[in-house]
Structures are given as C-alpha cells and as structure tokens.
Amino acid sequence: MPDALSRLDPPPAGGVAWLDVSAGTPDAWNARARTGPLGLQIAPLPHSRAPYFFKGARLRGTRCAWSAATVSGAELSRGARPAGPVTDTALHILVRSECAGSVFEPVEPISGGIVKVVDPVRELHERFPANAHLFTLNVARPLIGVEPTTLAGMIGRDFELTGFQAQLLRSAVGLLTGRGEDLSGAAALVGIDRYLGALAGLLLRTAVRRPPSELAQLDAIRSRTDAIIAEQGADPLLTPASIAVQLNVSLRQLYRAFTGTESPAARIRRRRLEHAAELLASRGAPAQVERIAGQCGFVSAEYFSRAFRREFGISPRAYRATHRDTVRSDTVRSDTTMRSDTTMRSDTTMRSDT
C-alpha cells in the first residue's frame, strides 16, 4: 500500500483531524487496522467486493468530539474497555445510514438509518458492506441534559433515524468543513461542547416521541422561563425553584421541559455572566469587580470569577482591560483621523486663499 494513507490522530482541542484510509481491493490491504472515532479499529470487511475506504473528519472540543465519515467495505470494531473516570461520565452515539455519495457531498437525502446509544465501555462492532454515512458523538453526559434514568433506559438500544434528526446531522457536518483556526479560542471551545451536548440531547429527545399536547406545554414552559430569566436575571434570589413557583409547575416539570438542552440553572448563570461582560466593557461601570458581581446576581465574587473564566476563558479583570484597551485604541485612531482631516482642510483652505 502507498505511504500516503493517513492515521486519524486525536486532533487538538478545537481542531479538525481528517482520515482517508482506502484500498483498490480489500485483498490488497496488508497494514494493521487504523484507529478511528470512538476508538474504533478500521479494517477491510472480509470477502467484500465493495471498494474499501473510510473517509471523514473529526472535531474535538474540551469534553466532546464529533465526526462524520463515508464508509464502504469496512468493519469497525472495539473491544470491551475498563470503566474509569472518563468512560463513566461519557456517552457514545453512533448513527449510520446507507446513502450514496460523500458525507460532505451526498448524492441524495438521508431516507433512513439507525441511531445507536452506546456505553463507552461496551464492545462495539459495525459492518459496512456498501457505501454508507457514519456519524459519531462522544459527549460528556452532564452536557446532554437528559435525566439519568431516561438515559440509562436508552443505552444499548437502537432507534430509527427520523428526517428531523437527519437534518440535525447534516447541519453539524458544516463544523468539519469550516476554518479550524476560528474554533481555537477558549470561548469557541465552550461553544463546541455546548453545541455537541445540545445535538446529542436533541437526538435522544427526539428518539422517543411525545404527544403533541405535551410538546406544546413544554415549549410554553421553556419560553416563559427564558422571559423570566431575561427580566429577573440580576436578582440573586432568582433560582429554578422560584421560577417553578412563578410558573405554577413543579421543579421536576421545569427541568423536564429543558431535557436535552441547557438547564434553567445554567441559563440563569449564563444570563448573569453575559450581563457582567456588558458591564465590564462599559466605561461607566463600577471599578470593583466585586460590585459588578453583586449587580449581576452573584452572591460570591470568588464564584463569579471562576464562572466567568470558565465561560470566557479569561478573568473578569483581564476581560475589562482587554476590552477597554481596544476601545481606547479605537478612540485614539478616531481622534488622530479627525485631527488629520482638520489639518488637511486647513491647508487646502490656505492654498486656495493664496
């Protein structure tokens, strides 16, 4: 085989790694199996007449990873693995669909497929006798937003891929074809994990169909909750429990409405952090970070600083200094431009008078 064949090494956080493993015929493949997403070993399917290839890409955040690939004439396998801190808090979702063309340029829409919810420690074996599209998600369970009991009941089960889920996956493929350097910042990495967690949650939530009346009720709870948070986010007494009281629902009902997406508590925290960022960027804001924390609903300045750093990748003071330096530089450039224009007009007037 030619040396051009490449191995899919784990990409750096925020980076995209590409894999192109192929052979003219399966019998010509004499190298060892290549390692792909989810730790799957990629090898030719024995006695297959189909072309052998696995071509795709993988994106990694800090706690989640996403991949899409086109597979043919291959078998993917992974032995049972010991449980540990990483596997105990992760979940694997594997979606396969027999579809023509590349996963990046499909010839036809996805008309059917299977969604598999996999325990990271379990053995896994998939065979692809013909051209198919494969999507994988390695997601931290806390980011999925599905109740642990519900999640436990879905592990090890297969679900039929719906048209809505297929559109979700198609949209997510765009992450792999974008510019990787745009995803390397701290805020972008947080966004990647959030996006992949929400994607996994939505795939799982839509795998179990609910009556339309129940879905409408949950949508109303989410909409009203977001309105309350937008209006009362700076109140330190605002909690998911107080929101449930205002909506006249139980706390369990409230959290159930947000299954598979960002929780009410996380939404409150995000709203407060966004407000704090606005104040830090404002030239008329209080000088003390502690006062800004209090104005945004944080009872502890220390907790505020930790949460702010996790969200934006830098401390509140560094954020303020960076933003104000940018504003100051823009102001200086603007003043310089105005003085230059004034001087040029004055010189032009003097030459005209002469």
Image: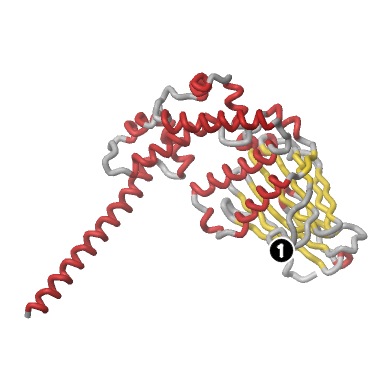
Residue 7 seen in this snapshot: no
Position of residue 137 relative to residue 55, above or below, is above
x, y percent for residue 68: 70, 54
At horizontal 68% and vertical 32% (from top left) the residue drawn is: 212
* Quadrant of the rendered image containing residue 237: top left
Q: 245 or 70: nearer the eye?
A: 245
Q: Which quarter of the image is occupied by the N terminus?
A: bottom right
Question: Going by the picture, which residue comes out furthest to the bottom?
Answer: 354
Determine which residue is flagged by label 1. Answer: 6
Q: Residues within 10 Å of mark 1 (few under 14, many from 20)?
A: few
Q: How is the image coloured?
A: secondary structure
Q: Which quarter of the image is occupied by the C terminus?
A: bottom left
Going by the image, does 339 lie left or right of 248?
Answer: left
At horizontal 78% and vertical 65% (from top left) the residue drawn is: 22
* Quadrant of the rendered image containing residue 51: bottom right
Q: 234 or 39: nearer the eye?
A: 234
Position of residue 310 relative to residue 350, above or below, is above
Going by the image, does 94 lie left or right of 176?
Answer: right
At horizontal 73% and vertical 30% (from top left) the residue drawn is: 152
Q: 258 or 189: nearer the eye?
A: 258
x, y percent for residue 57: 67, 57
* Quadrant of the rendered image containing residue 142: top right
Residue 279 seen in this snapshot: yes
> Tag 1, which secondary structure?
loop
Going by the image, does 2 lie left or right of 340?
Answer: right
Going by the image, does 123 lie left or right of 303?
Answer: right
Position of residue 149 relative to residue 329, above or below, is above
x, y percent for residue 40: 76, 50
